[in-house]
Image: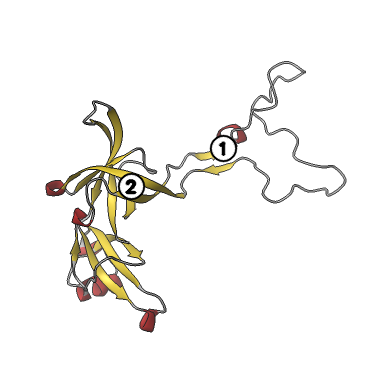
Amino acid sequence: MSGLIGKKIGMTSVFSAEGKNIPCTVIEAGPCVVTQIKTVEKDGYAAVQIAYDEKKEKHTSSSLLGHFKKAGTTPMRKLVEIKSFDKELNLGDVITLDIFEDDDWVDVTGISKGKGFQGVVKRHGFGGVGGQTHGQHNRQRKPGSLGASSYPSRVFKGKRLPGQTGGEQVKVLNLRILKKIPENNLLLVKGSIPGAKGSYLIIED
């Protein structure tokens, strides 16, 4: 396994050799710097910590400044641990999208767009309480009955109700890389990817 941190640029489409128009997402993938090597002996598990997206020193805590200086790199905004890499890495190594090949299949993790507090129709796909017949006039998008009466006199845990929607970590599996543009650190991945434009992504092979 190998991986990179990236940033969602937006969506576009490309034409295949057969003339089909394929929708794809443009991702700025890397370059990432190795900032820590975790081992079973010292940390209890093996992983590689990588960092992405430079930021100013004045916006970085002193403890993180020391962490980045130990790796010989400038402060970064996003830190992620990847469990295992195909090749052995050392502190301060730079990882680029060369770790991926054209037509590779990747898994992409991102934070979905937040939609705020939503009702049951939008959040769970409920049909509402029915049309404006049967005496309904102001309950078209309500959840309806919530449960029993005297027993158990409560609503069961896990009941699908209104609440905060989106803003959750989502992992999309098996997306195909359509094209690499190494000079601009860009990946074109088939299909849609969770998150707003400019949000961070984790791309794993």
Residue 144 rendering spot, x and y as whole percentages? 72, 32
**Quadrant showing the C terminus:** bottom left
> Which of the 4 quarters of the picture holds residue 30?
bottom left
**From the viewer's perspective, is residue 24 above or below residue 141?**
below
Q: Classify residue 185 as left or right of residue 141.
A: left
Q: Nearer the viewer, residue 197 or 103?
A: 103
In the image, residue 84 lies at what x, y percent?
33, 67
Query: In what element is the residue under mark 2?
Result: loop
The residue drawn where x is 45% and y is 42% is 114
Which residue sits at x=63%, y=32%?
126
Judge whether 130 appears above or below 13 on screen: above
Q: Residue furthest right?
A: 150
Residue named by callout 2: 199
Q: Is residue 73 above or below residue 130?
A: below
Question: As shown in the figure, which amino acid type bears the numbered disc 1?
Answer: Arg
Looking at the rendered structure, the secondary structure element under dot 1 is helix
Left or right relative to 96: residue 62 = right
**Quadrant where the N terminus is found in the figure:** bottom left
x, y percent for residue 66:
25, 75
Q: x, y percentage for residue 40?
A: 38, 80
In this view, the residue farthest toward the bottom is 41
Residue located 33% across and 47% down the image: 199
- Mark linked to residue 143: none
Residue picked out by circle 1: 123
Q: Give the amino acid type for the residue marked by disc 2 in the picture.
A: Ser
